[in-house]
Image: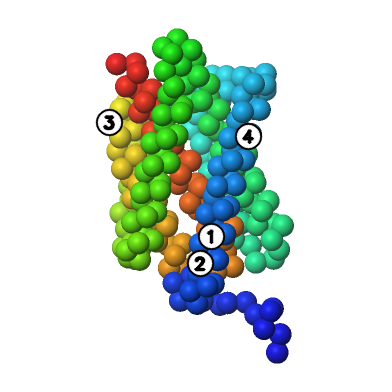
Amino acid sequence: MNIGSYQNPYTAAEAQPADRATFIRNTYMHVALAVGALVAFESIFLKTALAQAMSVKMLSGGALGWLLVLGLFMVVSHIANRWASSDTSSGIQYAGLGLFVIAEGVILAPLLLMAQSMETVMGDSLIAKAALVTGGLFLGLTAIVLLTRKDFSFMKSIVSIGFFVALGTIIAGAIFGFQLGTFFSAAMVLLLSGSILYSTSNVMHHYRTTQHVAAALALFSSLATLFWYVLQLFMSFSND
């Protein structure tokens, strides 16, 4: 029997301690790599004329145009998640994670460019502050799950309903022309904090120890979206 080729069929929670530790280490290493790749992508992309042109194009269609952009992003995210969860090959899994990082970088560009312009006028480090707060929240919520080992799967319905309500609010805002405002961003930060609790718990209790790329994508998705709304909060506070 070839022990070296054995694939653990159990979830991380049911795996041997050494396998579980390796899975957790690999997952968060890939989250860190995804964050690093996003930062590297944005540092180059935002300096190009293409970023400016794409950002203007995404925003020039108004609220309904932005809804189309979000719809395309959701389609790409679905494809990326399917690739990252593939059992076919590790290459497809990494392609899924890479595709999502690029898509996230593109959709973040307009917000980051606006934040940079505000920083130039006000001399405030909005992006750095948002990144610091987002990282602190993510690490704190992760620690809660890892230290307590509590299964937060009961939050699935709460998080799912919350996102459907948020999506409905965004669509209504686009159709009827009202601003979502600071309160909506604050509510989304709370919702995404719950999503990170659920996603981290889901990774620990329902992912196989070989699914570290898919697990990393799930966590990175929540982390990047949390950063989006934390940055919007800082930008709203700076405008007041």
- Quadrant for the N terminus in the image: bottom right
Question: Which residue is labeled 1 in the image?
Answer: 25
Label disc, if present, on residue 21 of the rendered structure: 2
Residue 83's spot in the image, x, y percent?
Answer: 64, 56
The residues tagged by marks 1 and 3 sit, at their Cα atoms, a distance apart of 36 Å
Question: Which residue is labeled 3 in the image?
Answer: 183
Which comes before the other along the chain, label 1 or label 4? 1
Question: Which numbered disc, 1 or 3, marks the residue closer to the eye?
Answer: 1
Q: Are marks 3 and 2 in contact (CB under 8 Å)?
A: no
Residue at (56%, 38%) from the top-left corner? 104
Type of the residue with mark 1? Arg
Type of the residue with mark 3? Phe
Q: Are marks 1 and 2 in contact (CB under 8 Å)?
A: yes
| For residue 39, side relative to residue 5 (left or right) | left
| For residue 63, side relative to residue 78 (left or right) | left
Instruction: Give the camera-side residue of 149 and 184.
Output: 149
Type of the residue with mark 4? Ala
Which comes before the other along the chain, label 3 or label 2? 2
**Judging from the image, what secondary structure is the residue with disc 2 in?**
helix
Which comes before the other along the chain, label 4 or label 3? 4
Type of the residue with mark 2? Ala
Question: Which numbered disc, 4 or 3, marks the residue closer to the eye?
Answer: 4
Label disc, if present, on residue 40 of the rendered structure: 4
Label disc, if present, on residue 226 of the rendered structure: none
